[in-house]
Image (cartoon, rainbow, N blue to C red):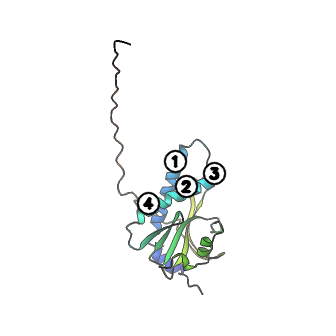
Amino acid sequence: MIELITEEQAKDILAPHLAVVKAIMIESLEDLNKALSIIPESVNKRAKCSLLHSIAIEKSKKHFANVSDVHISLKYQSIQIIFNKKLVGRIKKVNKDNKCSNAKTNRNDSILSQQLTLFPDVSSTTFIDLGYEMDTTWAEYKRHIVVCRLNDSIEWHIDFTDISENAISLTAKKADPLSLKEEVQIKIKKTKNQ
């Protein structure tokens, strides 16, 4: 029998991190929308989702790099965020039923069936989705939710939509604005033959 972390245990483990995860996702969506605003062509939802995921991965790697109870595992062009060696989270878009749609792969089947073969060095882990649901315009999130699944069954979920991320500063120091050097024009000297 698989012994999963309970919802209450997960709340204790994730309490110091959910506001940060939400801040990462909000900042990632802001960056995505800035980038999309300069692209004259329409971008489909799949591409938006992929780009949002990529931005969130990079921000997560940077932010959690020096957090003692969080480990980042880079695998499969994605990350697994391991909290307190107990919960392994992946960033996923979810539907109204709190489920993410995934391609049928051995890896995904292992995650959904809570198989530990993906992390043999970490025992007693529970896989979770750090989920988000988008509004139809992709301008903002409808909600943020942690979902623990066992195959097709949702074992528990933690809605963290209402957690305040305002006090979280993801960027310690803003980059200095680029300094522009004054251009010097070169004058071509005329020769006698011209």
User: Residue 109 vs residue 68: left or right?
Assistant: right
Q: Which mark is residue 44?
A: 3
Q: Amino acid at mark 4?
A: Asn
Report which residue position mark 2 lands on. 51
Contact between labelled residues 3 and 4, with CB atoms less than 8 Å apart? no
Report which residue position mark 1 lands on. 35
> Toward which corner of the image does residue 99 lie, by quadrant?
bottom right
* Residue extending furthest toward the bottom: 1
Task: Tell me the quadrant of the picture where the C terminus can be found.
Answer: top left
- Residues packed near mark 3 inside 10 Å, few (<14), some (14 to 19) or many (20 plus): few
Identify the residue at image location x=46%, y=59%: 58
Considering depth in this image, is 115 or 29 the residue closer to the camera? 115
* Discs 4/1, front: 1
What distance separates the C-alpha of mark 4 from that of mark 1? 23 Å
Report which residue position mark 4 lands on. 166
What distance separates the C-alpha of mark 2 from that of mark 1? 10 Å
Mark 1 or mark 3, which is nearer the start of the sequence?
1
